Amino acid sequence: MIITISRLMGSQGCSIARMVAERLGFPLLWRELIHRAAAESRAHTVALKAIDELGLLGLSLDDEECQAYQQSIRAIIMDIARQKDAVILGRGAQVVLKDHPSALHVRLIAPLDLRVKNLMRQYHISAQQARARLEASDRYRQEFYRRIFHVDWEDPTLYHLILNTGLIGAERACDLIVHAGTFILNVEAHKDV
């Protein structure tokens, strides 16, 4: 089973992904996918841009690099899905594995005021700085998905579950994701019977 988690910055997505992976005993794959895709495609600018969500480096992407990176990340994610169970955080895995029969695609969201508070606490910054980071991150992610995968990352049809961590918190979000993943595994197991 593969669980893909897409998240808004400040929605506790990283923590929840770690908790889900730990609870299921799955590896959590995230930034290493960027590094591997960059190395295989030689699209190092795209990899740096993928890490630089706030646009601090001022990098621009050319179409050839984007295509090479997209092909590489797609091949890596498909290879992972064929070989093992995993939790994949970001990287467009919900798009790459949209038709994978034993994948669960989750999007984590939270109200802006909570996201601001979470960033303030995490990075010890002001509300104004946190809001600026969130806006930059949201713009970057929207552009990344549009440019690399030609989709709107907020499209609800990309996901099985959309969870508002402002309403349910991290622990309950983890519980729901694990439960949904177990359900999908059981459904897939009974298809062969």
Image (cartoon, helix red, strand yellow):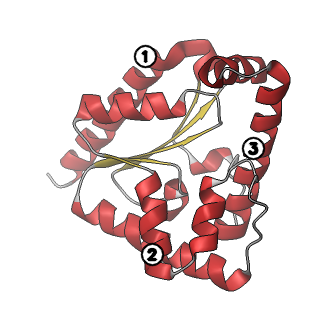
Q: How many numbered dots are placed on residues in this image?
A: 3
Label 3: element kind = helix
Most foreground residue, 167 or 22: 22
How far separated are the C-alphas under marks 2 and 1? Answer: 36 Å
Residue 168, how many percent across, how many down? Answer: 55, 14
The residue labelled by disc 2 is: 39
Label 1: element kind = helix
The residue labelled by disc 3 is: 138
The residue labelled by disc 1 is: 171
| Mark 1 neighbour class, 10 Å CA radius: few under 14, some 14 to 19, many 20 or more | few
Q: Residue furthest bottom?
A: 64
Q: Closer to the N terminus: mark 3 or mark 2?
A: 2
Q: Is residue 23 above or below residue 185?
A: above
Residue 181, how many percent across, how many down? Answer: 34, 37
Residue at (46%, 70%) from the top-left corner? 37
Q: Closer to the N terminus: mark 3 or mark 1?
A: 3
The reply, left or right, for residue 2 in relation to residue 68 is left
- Dividing the picture into quadrants, the one containing residue 104 is top left
Residues at marks 3 and 2 touching, judged by CB atoms closer than 8 Å = no
| Mark 2 neighbour class, 10 Å CA radius: few under 14, some 14 to 19, many 20 or more | some
Residue at (76%, 52%) from the top-left corner? 56
**Which amino acid is tagged 2?**
Ala
Let me know if residue 95 appears in the view.
Answer: yes
Most foreground residue, 140 or 130: 130
Most foreground residue, 137 or 96: 137
Residue 160, how many percent across, how many down? Answer: 51, 41
The reply, left or right, for residue 76 in relation to residue 136 is left
